[in-house]
Image: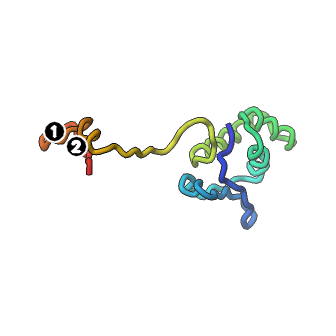
Amino acid sequence: MKLKDGLILREVAGQYVIVPTGKRVQEVTNIVYISASAAYLWDYMKDHEFEKENLVKQIMEHYTGVTEEKASEDIDKFLNTLSANNILDDGVKSGGSFIRIPKEQFDKLWPSGKDSKDNKGVSNS
């Protein structure tokens, strides 16, 4: 896994916020705040490809008094937040695609017919 490009982390009024830049502004539409420990991980993640185990190791080496189980649970939540907000490049494509089909091809695929039930809601205009 890795973080998508075009994202920066900023500290604003004592809170850490992930800010999209360039083309990412269209993909990352929510304001995503993260904790100080997540910001620590972000610093590692922005320069490395990683797996969950790498992040657990980073937390265990940096913080005292945290169990591996708790670190793993928190990192799961963090990675889920990143993935849900289109920040994590985890190999899963999200969002939709748009393709333009020439009218002749469209008409072959979906012949128009006033009484056809197959093309309800489909428009070739």
Q: Which circle marks residue 38 in the picture?
A: none
Please, what secondary structure does the residue beneath circle 1 have? Answer: loop
Query: How far across and how far down the image is residue 36, in percent?
Result: 77, 53
Mark 1 packing: few (<14 Cα in 10 Å), some, or many (20+)? few
Horizontal arrangement in the rendering, residue 114 relative to residue 82 (left or right)? left
Q: Which residue is mark 2?
A: 120
User: What distance separates the C-alpha of mark 1 from that of mark 2?
Assistant: 7 Å
| Circle 1/circle 2 CB separation < 8 Å | yes
Task: Give the residue at x 69% y 53%.
Answer: 34
Query: How far across and how far down the image is residue 60, in percent?
Result: 83, 38
Query: How far across and how far down the image is residue 69, in percent?
Result: 74, 33
Q: Which residue is mark 1?
A: 116
Please, what secondary structure does the residue beneath circle 2 have? Answer: loop
Location of the N terminus (image quadrant): top right
Horizontal arrangement in the rendering, residue 120 relative to residue 31 (left or right)? left
Q: How many marks?
A: 2
